[in-house]
């Protein structure tokens, strides 16, 4: 009996049900618990809560990769304990990042010889990449203004109102005024003519978007370059261009190789791209590439030697994992140019299938373009009874996460739904989504009108 009692007290969970074993108490929320728990219990508590998250594969709001091959998953797990910043200790990982930088620079037509080393860095995403590129532009502008004996305390940056929020963060954090070109109904990207008109002697750069967050559309970087070259010649300025290719950088080279948007244009001095979007890597990897070494001010590069060797670094953070860098290299050599082109073509084709299905309902206007990021943005033709936000909310009952939002400044009266087509969104899922949208419309038609509705959108 004593043995039985001791056993019972030391491991009561042996005689407990599934529920009482793991969920007697709520999960800790504010303070660290006083006592330890078994690894099985900790796993079960967290796993149970995570079941309430949405299915990433059905999250059609996100551009971020949600599936990779098992072989790459294994590489990620095998390198998850490597801190990338320890370059001397992990020289092969450092070499792999450098290979990625060179491959992406050549993909973007940087003016490099076969043996030249590209100038760039891996980041945790395009937000950090944009901060770094913006800092380089600001520092170069300040240095030039100081050398000319001119005021250098009021830098500005010209971009469209359709930019991602990271550009607003850059402006606020690093004290650079954002001069935004408003969009207009039917034209939801930056107008190059208006953008160049906004440029003045304090403009550190013009930022063009290759793949707008709102509708996937490519901005006309070639026209922007040509207009800005003319203005620079007339004014004596040398205002450059940065291309935010977070979404489109891994699409345009494969689907639209003749499109001039990259380093083929002389005023394009830096480009960022998200490896975790159409670079086909899980969240946590971005890249920034500079045209030449002269476009990255040397004073922004730090040299550290307390990890074993002299190591140049230009990042906003210090420690970061190596897994996503290795995963990016896997995709680049596994897929090659042919593989990336096939993936992107398939995404584009599936977007066209979805677009056609929506048009066939007769209920939607399409706000996205056929050429661009594989995104389908659409709005209701008749909003007198219900709106896009109600459609979005009701689609969640079927598991779909389809965002609804107003367009940016200048067209805020227009609301759209947006579906991002990723590699793991099949043609079958596209057909099923259309079917579920039709069901939702039928249910909404049977409900009383929403009293807050306005006039139909054109």
Image (cartoon, rainbow, N blue to C red):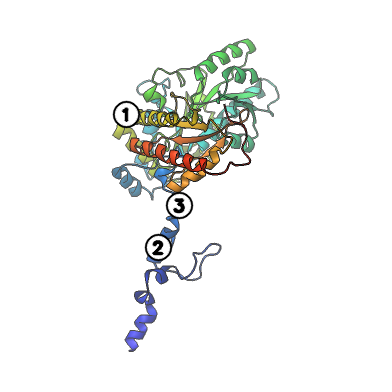
Q: Residue at x 38, y 36 (%)?
A: 430
* Relative side of 194 to 397, left or right: right
Badge 3 vs badge 1, beta-carbon distance below 8 Å: no
Q: Earlier in the sequence, mark 1 or mark 2?
A: 2
Disc 3 versus disc 1: distance between alpha carbons?
31 Å
Q: Which quadrant of the figure has residue 235?
A: top right
Q: Earlier in the sequence, mark 3 or mark 2?
A: 2
Identify residue for label 3: 53
Q: Which quadrant of the figure has residue 23?
A: bottom left
Residue closest to the eye, 437 or 34? 437
Identify residue for label 2: 44
| In the depicted structure, whether residue 227 falls above or below residue 370 | above
Identify residue for label 1: 342
Of tags 3 and 1, the one toward the viewer is: 3
Could you tell me which secondary element the residue under label 3 belongs to? loop
x and y, in percent, of residue 237 in the image: 62, 16
- Point out the residue furthest to the bottom here: 1
Q: Is residue 124 visible?
A: no
Q: Residue at x 34, y 88 (%)?
A: 2
Of tags 3 and 2, the one toward the viewer is: 3
x and y, in percent, of residue 355 in the image: 42, 29
Could you tell me which secondary element the residue under label 1 belongs to? helix
Q: Earlier in the sequence, mark 3 or mark 1?
A: 3
Could you tell me which secondary element the residue under label 2 belongs to? helix
**Residue density around tag 1, few if under 14, some if 14–19, many if 20 or more, within 10 Å:** some
């Amino acid at each position: 009996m004593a043995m039985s009692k001791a056993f019972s007290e030391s491991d009561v969970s042996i005689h407990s049900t599934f529920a009482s074993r793991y969920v007697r108490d709520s999960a800790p929320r504010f303070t660290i618990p006083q006592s330890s728990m078994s690894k099985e219990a900790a796993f079960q508590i967290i796993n149970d809560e995570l079941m309430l998250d949405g299915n990433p594969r059905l999250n059609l709001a996100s551009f971020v990769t949600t599936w990779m091959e098992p072989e790459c998953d294994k590489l990620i797990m095998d390198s998850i304990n490597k801190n990338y910043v320890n370059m001397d200790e992990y020289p092969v990982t450092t070499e792999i990042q450098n290979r990625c930088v060179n491959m992406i620079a050549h993909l973007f037509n940087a003016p490099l010889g076969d043996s030249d080393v590209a100038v760039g860095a891996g980041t945790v995403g395009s937000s950090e990449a944009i901060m770094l590129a913006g800092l380089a532009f600001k520092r170069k502008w300040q240095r030039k203004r100081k050398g000319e004996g001119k005021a250098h305390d009021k830098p500005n940056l010209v971009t469209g109102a359709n930019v991602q929020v990271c550009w607003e963060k850059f402006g606020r954090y690093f004290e650079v005024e954002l001069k935004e070109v408003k969009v207009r109904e039917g034209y939801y990207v930056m107008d190059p003519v208006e953008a160049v008109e906004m440029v003045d002697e304090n403009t550190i750069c013009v930022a063009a978007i290759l793949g707008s967050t709102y509708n996937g559309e490519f901005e006309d970087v070639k026209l922007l370059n040509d207009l800005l070259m003319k203005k620079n010649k007339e004014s004596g300025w040398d205002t450059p261009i940065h291309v935010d290719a977070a979404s489109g950088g891994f699409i345009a080279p494969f689907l639209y190789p003749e499109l001039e948007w990259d380093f083929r244009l002389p005023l394009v001095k830096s480009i960022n791209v998200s490896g975790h979007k159409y670079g086909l890597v899980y969240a946590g990897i971005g890249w920034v590439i500079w045209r030449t070494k002269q476009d990255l001010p040397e004073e922004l590069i730090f040299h550290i030697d307390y990890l074993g060797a002299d190591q140049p670094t230009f990042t906003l953070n210090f420690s970061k994992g190596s897994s996503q860098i290795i995963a990016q290299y896997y995709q680049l050599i596994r897929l090659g140019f042919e593989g990336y082109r096939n993936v992107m073509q398939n995404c584009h084709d599936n977007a066209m299938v979805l677009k056609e299905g929506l048009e066939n309902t007769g209920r939607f206007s399409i706000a996205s373009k056929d050429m661009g990021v594989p995104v389908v943005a659409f709005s209701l033709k008749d909003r007198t009874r219900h709106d896009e936000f109600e459609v979005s909310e009701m689609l969640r009952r079927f598991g779909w996460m389809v965002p609804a939002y107003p367009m940016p400044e200048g067209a805020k009266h227009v609301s759209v739904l947006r579906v991002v087509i990723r590699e793991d969104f099949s043609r079958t899922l596209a057909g099923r989504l259309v079917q579920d949208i039709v069901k939702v419309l039928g249910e909404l038609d049977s409900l009383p009108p929403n009293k807050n509705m306005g006039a139909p959108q054109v």
